[in-house]
Image: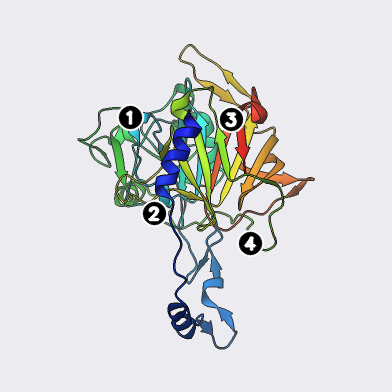
Amino acid sequence: MLKRALIIALSSLTLVACSSDKEIKKESDKEAATPVVKEETGVETEDMYQSPLTGVGEENESTARSVAVMVNNHPKARPQSGLSKADIVYEVLAEGDITRFLAIFQSRMPKEVGPVRSARDYYIELAKGYDSLYVAHGYSPEAKEMLMNGFIDDLNGIQYDGTLFKRASFRKAPHNSYITYEHIKEGADKNGFDMNRPPKALNFSDKGKIKGEAANSVMISYNQNPLFNVVYDYNEKEGRYERYSNGEQTIDYDSKDPVLVENLFIVEASHQIVDDAGRRDIDLESGGNAYLIQDGKLRKVHWENVDGRILPFENDKPVSLRKGSTWINVIPSSPGLTGSVSYQE
């Protein structure tokens, strides 16, 4: 039923490419822009520098520190603000069947991001892998201990509710906490956090054709809860994947921009319930099976934790990412990839 509804929804959204008008094409060929070239070297300016977390060419070297924000994914928090500008997003289970996002921003900073939700220890560790300033509103006991002991630079809504963090009137708590990038900078300045240290760059390449099985539509099921079923559909015109939750496209609340994904990385990891509240211990250290999905193709690979980053490997060698955004879905190893992920041409 979900796929049938999704197909109907997608059919109404299909964009028709244009135009076949020969005169327009002829005119556009005449006026095709010449790349800006630095005369003394012959190097295109867009290739002078690359964004460390997307690989996209930039005219100026980026020196900004990355910012990792806990973003609410409860149905009452959708659509969220800021996700379309994230370089990397982790989607991981919190309590129950509910997932949350860890959105990492560096190349583009959103004007506002949220709703902001509470911290868990494994999200903090993932943020630490990119030396991010970590932003959350609330925490579990384990997360609180890590933050209070200075494991990572952070801003938390518990300390700054009503100042750096604002409550939106159009939603109810706990789904209404938001923070602007200006307030993130203000909080970093107040606490003396260094915001001019860019993360170590990831490995990118757009050379060569992607090999693998056809995967134009990919569905991920989190514990059979349809509210958190995720579908990624390949938009061939864009060369990127569109994202859907419970049959609705993931867009930005403010700009209405869709989330578009170049690299979809699905990894399985051991999950264990550790307390009566349903909090989890997730093994993000040991590595395991994974799917890497790019350009409409799926490759069966492995993941490894390299200095706190979850990265793809094939035959014990790192696999390059396509230039652009990366979404990493962490799923329980039971039922694992075969039980939680389906894909089709």
Q: Quadrant of residue 139?
A: top left
Q: Residues within 10 Å of mark 4 (few under 14, many from 20)?
A: few
Q: In the drawing, does residue 86 fall left or right of residue 174? A: right
Judge the density around disc 3: few (<14), some (14-19), many (≥20) Cα neighbours within 10 Å. many
Q: Which residue is rendered at x = 43% and y = 35% of the image? A: 247
Q: Nearer the viewer, residue 62 or 215?
A: 215
Q: Is residue 91 something one can see in this rendering?
A: yes
Q: Is the residue marked by circle 1 packed among few (<14), some (14-19), or many (20+) residues within 10 Å? A: some
Element carrying mark 1: helix
- Coordinates of residue 137 in the picture (x, y in percent): 36, 33
Q: Is residue 69 visible?
A: no
Q: Which mark is residue 109?
A: 2
Q: Position of residue 303 (x, y in %)?
A: 68, 40
| Disc 3 from disc 1: Cα separation | 22 Å
| Pointer 3 residue | 331
Q: Is residue 233 left or right of residue 195?
A: right
Name the residue that disc number 4 marks: 206
Measure how far apart labels 2 and 4 are at the Cα level. Answer: 24 Å
Q: Who comes first in sequence, dot 4 or dot 3?
A: 4
Residue at horizontal 53%, vertical 53%?
Answer: 240
Question: What's the image's color scheme?
Answer: rainbow
The three-letter code of the residue at mark 3 reads: Ile
Mark 4 is on which residue type? Asp
Count of marks placed on residues: 4
Q: Amino acid at mark 2?
A: Met
Describe residue 261's horizontal placement relative to residue 177 as left or right.
right
Contact between labelled residues 1 and 3, with CB atoms less than 8 Å apart: no
Residue placed under numbered mark 1 in the picture: 76
Q: Circle 2: is it few (<14), some (14-19), or many (20+) Cα within 10 Å?
A: some
* N-term-proximal mark, 1 vs 4: 1
- From the image, state whether disc 1 or disc 2 is nearer to you: 1
